[in-house]
Each structure stands twice: as C-alpha cells, then as structure tokens.
Image (cartoon, rainbow, N blue to C red):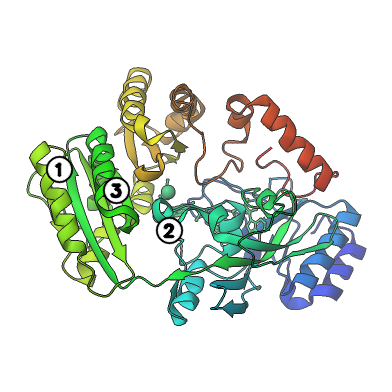
Amino acid sequence: MSVLPNSLLQALHAVLGDAGLIRDAERMHSYLSDWRNAYKGQAALVLRPASTEEVAAAVRLCSEAGVALVPQGGNTGLCGGSIPDESGAQVVLSLTRMTRIRDVDVGNETITVEAGVVLQRLQEAAAEVGRLFPLSLGAEGSCTVGGNLATNAGGTAVLRYGNMRDLALGLEVVLPNGRIWNGLRGLRKDNTGYDLKQLFIGAEGTLGIITAAVLKLFPAVRSLTTAWVALPSPQAAVELLGQMRSLCGDRLTGFELMSRQSLEFVLRHVAGCNDLFAEVHSWYVLIELSDTLFDAPLNDMLERGLAEAFEQGTVLDAVVASSQSQVAALWALREGISEAQNHEGPSLKHDISVPVSSIAAFVAEADKRLQQAFPGVRIVAYGHVGDGNLHYNISKPLGAEDAGFKAQAQAIMHVIFDVTASFAGSISAEHGLGQSKRDAARHYKDPLELELMRSIKQTLDPAGLMNPGKLL
Ligand code: FAD
Ligand code: 2HG
Ligand code: ZN
C-alpha cells in the first residue's frame, strides 16, 4: 500500500503512464539498495519519466503534495546518495528512460545528451564521430551522465582531462518547484555572472534534477602504451609521477597506485587475473601514456622514464603491455579491486584527497594510527595518486565478525579523516557525501562553507524535498 494520496498517484499516472510508474514491491526492489547492499531503503513509488517535460510535471506534482524525491541514475554511487530513507514516504525518480543523444556538434567539439545515457554509450557516441569522451571509471557500463554530473565523478583520466566539472559546458535542470532551467549552452567562455551549472554539479541531487548536459569532446586517442610497475613505497610513486610528467607532459593520462593488499584481493577473487612479477612487491602503479598521433613513440618515452627511475631505485620492476589484450589485463588488475574487496566482508570505503606531495606521509601516518587503534584491520589503499586521491579502504581483520567490525566503522573513519584533515585534505574527493559522510562533513568542513551551502539549499529548495538526508 502506497502512503501517497490517491489524487497524487492518479495525477502522476496521467502524466507518466504505465511505463513511468513502478508500484510493485518486487519491481521496486533494485531501486532500493546499492550494488554492495550497504544501503537499503523503502519508497512509496518509483517514477521513470521519459522526457524533461515529464520530469518537470512529476516534480511539480510531488512538490505541491510535499513529497520528497530521490533522484537516481545507474545506482552505482558508493555513499548511499541514490537510496531513499527507510520511511517508505519518499519517491525515487529514476532518469534511466532519458537516454537520447540530442546533438553532436563536431565543429564545437560538444555532445548534448540526456541524463540517463550510460557513460559507456556516451564514450561510444563520441568514438563514432572520431572523438573521445574521456571520463572513465569502473562502473562505466552502468553509471549515467546524470549521476556522473551529480557526483562530479572522477575516475582514471582526471590527471589529463579533469573531472565531470571540467567536462560540462551546459546543463538542463528541473528545479525543485518543477520549473525547467535551460542552461544547455555550448560555450567555452561566458562571463555573464555566477556559473550556475556548477551549483548542480556535485550537488548529489539536492538542488534539482539534471535532465541533460552539453559535454566537451576531445581528439581521439590513436596511440597508447600501458605499463605495470613495482615500487618500494608511495613516495617512490609520487617521485615517478613527477618524472613521467616532466618527460611526457599531457601524454601521461593514467597513473594509478595500488598496495600489495589491494592486488592480493584481486588475485584471490577476480577470475583470470595473475601476478605479473615473480617477486612480491609492496606497491604498484599502472601507467598509461596516450597520444592523438598514429605511431607516437610512447614506448620509447615510457621505457626511457622507467629506465631512469630504475637507476634511481624508484622503480623495482616493470612490464609494458604489448597487445590490446595485455592492456585490458593490466586494467583488470586495477579495476577489479572494488569487486574483490566485496568478497572479503564489509568494506569501509574512503575517497580522501591530500596534496599529491603529502600522499606518502598520509599513508604512513594513517597506517600507523589505524594499526595502533584497530590492530589487524586490512588496509586496501589504492587510487588516483596523480590527483592526490586515495581510496583508503578498510576490510575487517582476518577471522573477525562482521558485526564487531561494522560497529567500529565510525571510529575508523574518524581516524582516517583526522589524518586527512591534518594534511589539509578532503574527506571526499570522488564519491560525494551521500548518507555515509554527511555527518562527518559537519565536523570536517569549514562552518562558513556549510552555512553558504545551506543558504543555497534554502533558496533553491526551501521545502527540503530534493534528496533530503543527503550531503547536508
Ligand atoms: P547514482 O548512484 O544513481 O546517483 C549518485 C548520486 O547522484 C545520488 O545522490 C543521486 O541522487 C544523484 N543523481 C543521479 N542522477 C541524477 C540526476 N539526473 N540529477 C540529479 N541528481 C542525480 N566514481 C568516481 O568518481 N570515480 C571512479 O573511479 C569510480 N569508480 C567506481 C567503480 C565502481 C566499480 C563503482 C560501483 C562505482 C564507482 N564510482 C566511481 C562511483 C559511481 O559510479 C559514480 O559516482 C557515478 O558517477 C554514479 O553514477 P550513477 O548514475 O550510478 O548515479
Ligand atoms: C575506483 O577508483 C572507484 O576504483 C571505486 O572510485 C573505489 O570501490 C572503491 O572504493
Ligand atoms: Zn576512484
């Protein structure tokens, strides 16, 4: 039984039709928990509008009835932002039927897409016109452009191309009162006041519903080289990053760090993954160079950089992929970590950032403080070292009970965030605050910034009906 008034249900049905409304508990199920089953909620209804006008009408009806909405894309978020609360009174608004590519303007190097377009489809559409859409992340087969924008997604190519904030030129947004803001401008320069689109990017659905976006395209990549490198320490990784950057400039498009613990999880749980070196090493990086030229001498550059680093002791061993399938095998070692960690019991996920120059000191201090306070926890540290962004994830000690470990989650998180704060870092560099880090943000974020954020929320969503309980 829905808790919504019949009049609202009828009005929503009149606008969205059978295809736009899910009321059946079994069909609603997949919209009510995340892929890890870490967050579970209830909803009165799931709405699936197929156009901006339908989104606007649905939002207006819910707003008039005082019903809270939870925007949802591919539901791959990692901090519970797309999951409703347990009251059963909220309505999930899924954008997954809005999958049109509205326009490709090759002359302007832009593509205009609807919010429900899956990231991989967007990458393919760019490739079809000989261009690159560079956002790349493990969930790209299911996450949507709307979710990417709402979380300001990062991924493995931020080093070269920036995150979603850098890739968006214009947005279309349905505001909490149901009005449509058409900000679908494809301009690279526009100095006519506040850059309003940036308010909605990274807002995690708390200020309105993104329905479409104009995104930047880049020249297609025609040469690529990828290497898997063993290193003695995170400090060596930071040094190698600096060396490779000075040598290769913007050709350095990927630089991902992984601890031995992360690799061991992948080797244990992900089919087809193998260790590439006979010896066990403490740390690894995956390096990728790319170029728009055919036959660019990337291998020479890479080998030169690695040889210099080998002399200096920053690199211990390396293997360079010599075929497309080897490139995929190297990325599988990196991208497999999220899945592999799921097999080791509940995982505590952190996506902190610190200045790149502080990465090594951060890891040393956080490792020390955690092992003192929670002996035996398994630290699964990896991530986008070139962005200063580490997934400093934690798995329970071997043999420990799930419940006991989960009970320590907040205390563990606070140790990690205290160390992050001591390096002037951020408690979330990628995944957002959602439910999991909302309360921590109140503690770690500047009070004036929080005050300004609340006043923006109050202005745009005075009734607090857009994704309540998330972010703020
Ligand atoms: P959802 O999970 O559905 O929603 C995420 C948030 O956005 C929620 O708060 C939701 O309310 C809001 N939202 C969704 N759509 C809209 C909309 N149209 N308008 C307004 N608000 C909306 N993230 C990274 O940044 N980098 C990574 O490298 C990365 N790797 C990942 C790897 C794996 C294996 C997985 C499972 C996740 C990974 N993620 C990563 C996290 C996640 O994929 C991204 O946050 C992604 O951008 C979320 O997109 P989504 O469509 O699934 O959004
Ligand atoms: C990644 O970089 C993602 O692989 C996911 O951001 C991180 O699962 C995670 O904790
Ligand atoms: Zn990441």
Q: CA distance from mark 1 to mark 2?
A: 28 Å
Question: What residue is pinned by disc 2?
Answer: 137
Identify the residue shown where x is 40% and y is 51%.
Answer: 159
In the rendered view, does 88 fall on the left or right side of 165?
right
Amino acid on which the number 3 mark rests in the picture = Arg
Question: What residue is pinned by disc 1?
Answer: 309
Question: What residue is pinned by disc 3?
Answer: 245
Mark 2: secondary structure: loop
Mark 3: secondary structure: helix
Identify the residue shown where x is 44% and y is 25%.
Answer: 423
Q: CA distance from mark 1 to mark 3?
A: 13 Å
> Label 1 crowding class (10 Å Cα cut-off): few <14, some 14-19, many 20+?
some
Do labels 1 and 2 touch, CB within 8 Å?
A: no
Identify the residue shown where x is 50% and y is 74%.
Answer: 121
Residue 471 versus residue 185: which sits nearer the camera?
A: 185
| Image x and y of residue 90, in percent | 75, 52
Residue 120 versus residue 263: which sits nearer the camera?
A: 120
> Label 2 crowding class (10 Å Cα cut-off): few <14, some 14-19, many 20+?
some
Q: Where, quadrant-wise, is the N terminus in this rendering?
A: bottom right
Give the numbered dot on residue 183: none
Q: Is mark 2 within 8 Å of ligand 1?
A: yes
Amino acid on which the number 2 mark rests in the picture = Leu
| Image x and y of residue 89, in percent | 78, 50
